[in-house]
Image (spheres, rainbow, N blue to C red):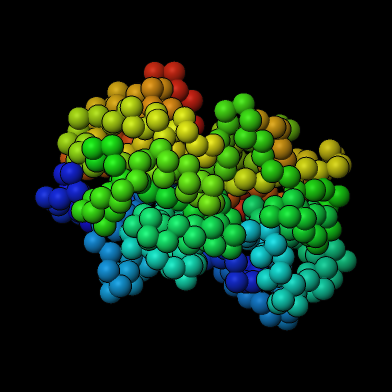
Amino acid sequence: MVKGVRFSDYRDVGHPVGTAKVYDAQGADELLFLDITATAEKRRTLFELVSRTADECFMPLTVGGGVRTLEDVRALLLAGADKVSFNTQAVADPAVLRDAAERFGSQAIVVSIDVKDGQVWTHGGRQPAGLQPVAWARRAVELGAGEIIVTAIDRDGTRSGYDIALVQSVADAVPVPVIASGGVGRLDDLVAGVRDGHASAVSAASIFHFTDQSVVKARAYMRQAGLEMRIA
Amino acid sequence: MIAVVDYGMGNLRSVAKALEAIGEEPLATRDPADLRAASHIVLPGVGAFSQCVANLRATGLVDVLDEEVRQRKKPFLGICLGMQLLANESEEGGRHEGLGWLAASVRRLHDDGGLKVPHIGWNDVRAEPGSPLFKGVRDPVFYFVHSYYVDCADPRLVSATCDYGVTFPAAIVADNIWAVQFHPEKSQANGLRFLQNFLSWS
């Protein structure tokens, strides 16, 4: 498993299943697995990883990276994912979202949107898609996406905080839950994502991988800030 | 043996693994003989209602389920869509008939008032104190991921509720039939305890 900075400079951060177990034990609400260099061959590894994680962690699991077809979605759901995230393929062929939502229900279909300079980027942040994040999010939801993950590419791994304006613009524009992603460096960033960004959920990686902040501390901090958190 | 009904939908594996984690030996199956031999039957479900009903009917298991669960009163647990399928009908993607085991209709959660639909995440479940469903669960918080809920005509069957814009049944108990909107197999320690409660109840 790796964690990068601005979608590159990846550092090894340990084995995914072991790490997932730690976050599970700490009471993380949900796990996001995004396979950043998904290729056909690596996808088999992803299926295996998902099933091994789901075998040991009885918690919600969203999986993305290289998801193209309804068969991919089906295989990941069968392996133990609860939600499957589309990114590049949804931009290339938006109808796949409609078909997937019809077959598996909107609650299982997530669209992950990577944003840089006010534009949507695909292919792991390497290609501009010629779309505005808010317009794309609206369209994805119309087609059947049941959740949106918004990642600010320039914040990813930098621990400089979410792009709150971006998160808020998307969260306010769509009727489905939005997950803020990219940039958390302090626990207060998580609070800001919900309070100011209007995100339904907040995600973080570096802060948990590289600092002594834990999911346990994050929950306590957010609860103290007045956000509703479950007692895990 | 606990039969987990395999009808090509949903997160069969997660349900089976959760049952294994509490020391059971679940069998994912679509063989009528297994359903007859089972001590308990679990019907998981993730997907779109019409697809799930069609798949379930296509397995030819509906009659066996009816015999084992409704006539022979075998303990049965329906999870998420496995709960919704028991209703008379659903409004998901048009109007579709369910199994009609419960006097209930499946309706869409309201997305007015700024609430996001699907309802995704952990939510409090309210039950009568001493409810056998949540024995040993200190804070009954469970994981939900759904856009539709079961609107039950008989409030006496509703054993637990959850609030999300509307107060909807989180759990229905009709005799030997347990049905829950949340995902015990994804609700960490609370979920595993709930599954134990289902298995030890009879």
Nearer to the camera, B50 or B186: B50
Give the image location of residue B179, x and y in percent: 72, 51
Relative to A126, residue A66 above or below: below
Count the marks: how many? 0
Nearer to the camera, A214 or A125: A125
Query: Residue visible at 82% across and 48% down?
Result: B104
Nearer to the camera, B6 or A96: A96
Query: Residue visible at 77% across and 59% down?
Result: B96
Identify the image quadrant of the N terminus of chain A: bottom left
Give the image location of residue A212, x and y in percent: 21, 34
Give the image location of residue A138, x and y in percent: 48, 42
Tell me, yes or no, if residue A190 can be seen here. no
Query: Residue visible at 72% across and 65% down?
Result: B53
Q: Residue furthest front?
A: A130
Query: Residue visible at 28% across and 37% down?
Result: A118
Give the image location of residue B181, x and y in percent: 65, 47
Tell me, yes or no, if residue B148 can be seen here. yes
Q: Is residue A87 left or right of residue B32?
A: left
Relative to A124, residue B117 above or below: above
Q: Which of the 4 image quadrants contains residue A219?
A: top left
Nearer to the camera, A137 or A13: A137
